[in-house]
Image (cartoon, rainbow, N blue to C red):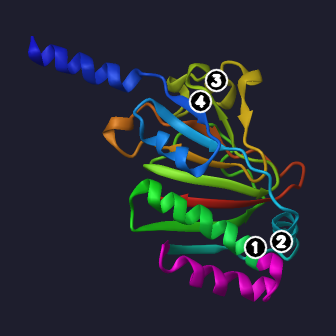
Amino acid sequence: MVSLLNNWFAVAQKTIPGRQCEVGDWQEWHLIHQPDVNLVFMPRAGTEGIRSFSERLIQIDFPGIDHVVSVGTVDAVLDVQLTRVGGDSAIAKEFAHDLATIIRAFIQITGRSKVKLILKVVSDDACERFHTDRYDLRLLCTYYGPGTEWTPDDNVNRKKLMGGTNDEIIRDWSRINRLQQFDVAILKGEASTANYGKGIVHRSPPVSAQKEKRLLLRLDA
């Protein structure tokens, strides 16, 4: 009987729908650690300087940053990577400061000593299919272009995630949400057995047909 109850409890844990939380400041990011939360997002209004530098990176076909950083190394990494394309300008420093603030907050929330930093220009539709990912926590922020799309758990046919089309996965397209430019989001994936079946279902918005580009910050713990 005990074994049956344990099995039932394990299944019940896996099928609890995830909850998505809009927060107002960094201190509330810790909500992502709650078992029933699979997305925390914080709306932001970018400054004119950050907006201008983001557009500049798009225009010069920025080669991107792919680096493992810690609290102690993030400033030096950003200084080297951004100075070579932006020079010693005020807007480059403002952009780097914004990145560093987000990175340090994410490191604190995850409890990790290091995180993977990726800043890249996206111009294809590589992740246009709705899916969950095999990671613990991932932070996304779109500095230029359309933001990441996500949908509540009860709008998803999870049985179709492995091989179905978007129309088979999504029950109601009117319930698709899109993060806005400069919004910061922490997404919960399914790397651990505790989160299996509960990762946030999301996708990159298709951009190639409209010849759009995105400047995307991604941090992986």
Disc 3 to disc 1, how far (Cα)?
43 Å
Specify whether residue 97 is in view.
Answer: yes
In the image, residue 81 lies in the stretch drawn in magenta = yes
The tag on residue 53 is: 2
**C-beta proximity under 8 Å, tags 1 and 2:** yes
Which quadrant holds residue 80? Answer: bottom right
Kindly state the secondary structure of the residue where label 4 is placed: loop
Q: In the rendered structure, which segment of residues is drawn in magenta?
A: 69-92
Disc 4 to disc 1, how far (Cα)?
43 Å
Nearest to N terminus: mark 3 or mark 1 = 1
Rendered-image quadrant of the C terminus: bottom left
**Please, what is the three-letter code of the amino acid marked with disc 2?**
Phe
Q: Which residue is mark 3?
A: 168
Q: Which residue is mark 4?
A: 164
Which quadrant holds residue 15? Answer: top left
| Nearest-to-viewer mark from 3 and 1 | 1
**Please, what is the three-letter code of the amino acid marked with disc 1?**
Glu
In the image, residue 80 lies in the stretch drawn in magenta = yes
Measured from the top left, where is residue 196 in percent x and y? 38, 35
Nearest to N terminus: mark 4 or mark 1 = 1
**C-beta proximity under 8 Å, tags 3 and 4:** yes
CA neighbours of label 1 inside 10 A, class few (<14), some (14 to 19), many (20+)? some
Nearest to N terminus: mark 1 or mark 2 = 2
Measured from the top left, where is residue 187 in percent x and y? 54, 44
| Nearest-to-viewer mark from 3 and 2 | 2
Disc 3 to disc 2, how far (Cα)?
39 Å
